[in-house]
Image: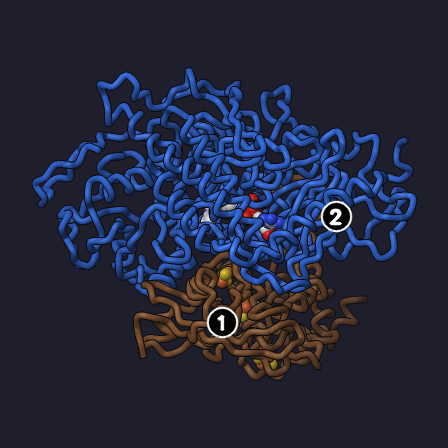
Amino acid sequence: MATDTVTLKIKRGESGGASRWEEFRVPRKPMMNVISCLMEIQKHPVTADGRGTTPVNWESSCLEEVCGACTMVINGRVRQACSALVKDLSPKGEPITLEPMTKFPRERDLVVNRQRMFDALRTTRAWIEIDGSHQLGAGPKVSQDDQEVMYPLSRCMTCGCCVEACPNYNDRSDFMGPQVISLTRLYNMHPSGRMQAGARLDALMGAGGISDCGKAQNCVQVCPKGIPLTESISVMGRETIKRALFGWLLKG
Amino acid sequence: MAAKSSILTQSNQVRRAIVVGGGLGGLMTVIKLCEAGIPVDLLSLVPVKRSHSVCAQGGINASVNVKGEGDSPYTHFYETVKGGDFLANQPPCKGMADAAPGIVFMLDRMGVPFNRTPEGNLDFRRFGGTLFHRTAFAGATTGQQLLYALDEQVRRYETLDVEDDRGVTVPGEKMVRKFEFWDLAGLVLDDEGVCRGVVAQDLKNGEMRAFRGDAVCLATGGPGLVFGRSTNSVINTGSAAAIAYKQGAIYANGEFIQVHPTAIPAADKLRLISESVRGEGGRVWVPKDRKDRRHGKDIPEAERYYFLEDRYPKYRNLVPRDIASSEIFRTVIHEGYSAEGEQAAYLDVTHLCKTASGKSAVRKKLEGVLEIYEKFAGEDPYENPMKIFPAVHYSMGGLWVDFEKGADGSLKPGSARNQATSIPGLYATGESDYQFHGANRLGANSLLSCIYGGMVTGPAMAAWREAQPRSAFDLPSTLFDTEHKRRVDEYAALGSRSGADYSVNPYQLHEKLGEMMLQKVTVERHDAELDGVLASLQDMKAQWRKAAALDPTAKGTINQPTVFLRHLDGMLALAEVIARGAREREECRGAHYKPALDPELHPDDPKAVGRDDARWLKTTLATYDGEGPTLRYEAVDVSLEPLAKRDYGKVSAAKKPTGEADAQGPANT
Ligand SMILES: Cc1cc2nc3c(=O)[nH]c(=O)nc-3n(C[C@H](O)[C@H](O)[C@H](O)COP(=O)(O)OP(=O)(O)OC[C@H]3O[C@@H](n4cnc5c(N)ncnc54)[C@H](O)[C@@H]3O)c2cc1C
Ligand code: SF4
Ligand code: SF4
Ligand code: FES
């Protein structure tokens, strides 16, 4: 296998249509990642066997693994294309395969529609209720210990890796996924967010909520931000049980 | 005839305002409009949660003076205008510095997980251009956390119903409607030149659509991609600002492009290593021996040249960005120092990581930043000095916007003039405007200016809307149909560019543009080279007309290569604005540096004026004349603080490191 080039096998296709594989060879450069390979293809849209083709469509923005746009299945594993380095994927020139995520409808080539993840943020009321953006003085105090728990939870970039890996997330179920369970934990920890904790727990106890999680733990292994998803699932599991048992007391 | 209802038309259509762009600037504008009761259509190239603002690492400035250092908003204001080499209008900067503590408190109330002191208060760190702890931060991903906080508030407005003037819910209408994966294609201007809406394109299926808006705001971010590779997100082409410029909006101070001193060089993007690394004690150095090829960590302390510390004993590694960038550039390119023989210097935190507790303190504050080095350069920065070089980072220039000065000399809140572009009814905010940073932006001042800009823009748009005798929703549809058809035809023409006449690959053309701009219009500018750039740009514009649609048969679906043609057209237009502005400005100010005019390099040359306030204390105003930019100049409002020399206590550029192994003196180019 040649190591002065990178070989890519890319699964392409239209929304709802059949898929086809195309193979490309691009010159290998230092510090290259999957996105820089795709950019090379834009500049020379020719397949490995010399046929002219069209540039591949994909999503990306930050190229720093912080916006969540470029998620795809690379060598069988769901991850961000921008942080997938060629030197790790193909140390000896092995071909690299790129496929769109499977849990979302394909739009074109490597682009899928992840609107369902954003809708789940609405359903679970993933925000803090503030009275307004005008001056109301300093915010509530937060201990360093709490901040250290909350900060990692707040780094979820709605990238979709966790739900791609989750066996219970698919087009036959309403499951909203582990990321919203973890975010609910975040908002319910915040000193003023806590005041609407009940409403968020109710959303998690509704359709597509926490009871759809089978505790398979695939999610936590693929989260690029190392978010403690299974820990959040058990914390919120306990909270929802408490609410189911005693919630009527609190509601008065 | 006054509108019957300020919320609904006769046919029960909701009268909305339009915000294009959902980074910090756009989202804050949306929140303020909603709080004023005005429903909004929010358009964005990407889901707003993926906007470029997520990239900001270091933090946001506010003089809360938590450390009892005697910091104050006035000092923040002064350092902002001084850092900007006095090119920024002072009233808006004063307004921003005064509002900053309140903005950080608001973000805290929205749930941003800012770092804390042991007492549970917000923690602040030091950043370049100041001696105070003034920067609030959330780990090393402050921009991400800030964007998410505003995104969440806007999502809440997506669930809230529109109410009419009597407080009755309008069925099925929400305060915010989001149009994500939409690209701005044109502005709808009426016969008087007032902006009444936009035409935009759904990137999922190519559909072009006209939107009516009772006020329109562009919050579409910076134009980093004009330089090919930069620290910016790859969607930052500046296309929306270029469209406004081509339709008559003034573009101001385009030549002021901030180059960040410390980025990791790579083929697809130059990834930033935040200034916070230096704020937390990171040191910049090169091996004293110019021929040293050893790995950074094998070079003993005595053989390292800490050139920033030597040259700026007071600010040391925390000199402002433009100074750090040009010092690194000069040290490497002209003086011939290198890191392992590569064109780079070292940024080093390993001295802080010698003990376990030191290392964990660094990890706690900088993990997210250092992770980027580890992830993308493939080396452990806790053990190895990082190799860095300057990279294009931020545009101080942008769409020209107005302001109204209040009796106290600060910006007057609520005025419809604030943040208004030269096209009536069109506003701009965030990095796409030019307002707050003069010739150079201080670190951690941009997130602030985006949010402050939004806080001012929302009420300004509300005031404008209120004052209009006619709503855009009551105008004849022909106005919107005309611009719509123009853009549909334009896109169809781009999409059908195939065959022998179209031999140019647009991505290759973009690469050529980027390489040229990066080499010739960044840290150092030479008139002869700029003349060459301007000539080449004419050539590249001709090539653009031959650029092919690489996917001509794909209709009704995603077609990234055709949309890229539109963005490339915008980048070429802005490149010309930037290069022309740089060519014409005969002085050194902030990020704009011409070695030929540097008195330190040419002490005996009367033409080497350095900063020339008598002739050049002026804002550059570029208007599009159908071919390219025509430049005019406007006075800067310096009504609050007198000009001072921008001095960060430099000792002497020519000072040689003690004990340098190489006998050859520093080059004096
Ligand atoms: C790596 C990095 C680190 C930084 N760190 C800091 C920091 O620590 N502190 C600090 O103060 N500043 C920092 N900055 C600067 C700061 O992040 C940006 O200036 C700021 O986030 C810009 O925000 P914005 O709201 O203007 O636009 P953006 O966040 O860029 O958002 C632009 C929006 O407009 C939309 N858009 C763009 N074009 C179109 C179009 N044609 N049609 C429709 N929609 C469009 C996009 O989809 C997006 O929603 C950093 C910048 C970089 C690159
Ligand atoms: S624990 Fe398993 S079932 Fe539950 S969300 Fe994670 S992957 Fe899915
Ligand atoms: S939890 Fe992790 S994997 Fe899931 S969406 Fe968030 S960042 Fe991605
Ligand atoms: S492009 Fe943002 S995560 Fe990869």
Which residue is pictured at 85% across the width and 39% down the height? B474
Could you tell me if the residues under marks 2 and 1 are in contact, i.e. CB atoms within 8 Å?
A: no
A242 or B152, which lies in front? Answer: B152
Which residue is pictured at 45% across the width and 30% down the height? B581
Q: Position of residue B301 (x, y in %)?
A: 16, 51
- Residue at numbered disc 1: A79
Q: Chain of mark 2?
A: B
Which residue is pictured at 46% across the width and 44% down the height? B540
Residue B363 shows in this picture:
no
- Residue at numbered disc 2: B210
Q: Quadrant of residue B191?
A: top right
Q: Residue furthest front?
A: B500
Q: Nearer the viewer, mark 2 or mark 1?
A: 2
Q: Chain of mark 1?
A: A
Label 1: element kind: strand
B292 or B166, which lies in front? Answer: B292
Residue B530, relative to residue B495: is it above or below? above
Which of the numbered marks, if any, corresponds to residue A151?
none
- Marks 2 and 1 sit apart, C-alpha to C-alpha, by 37 Å
Under mark 2, the amino acid is: Ala
Query: Chain A's shade in the image?
Result: brown
Residue B52, relative to residue A226: is it above or below? above
Q: Is mark 2 within 8 Å of ligand 1?
A: no
Q: Are there few (<14), some (14-19), or many (20+) residues within 10 Å of tag 1?
A: many
Q: Which chain is blue?
A: B
Q: Position of residue B258 (x, y in %)?
A: 42, 39
Residue B344, relative to residue A83: is it above or below? above
Which residue is pictured at 13% across the width and 50% down the height? B291
Left or right of residue B476, residue B624 in this image? left
Under mark 1, the amino acid is: Arg
Label 2: element kind: strand
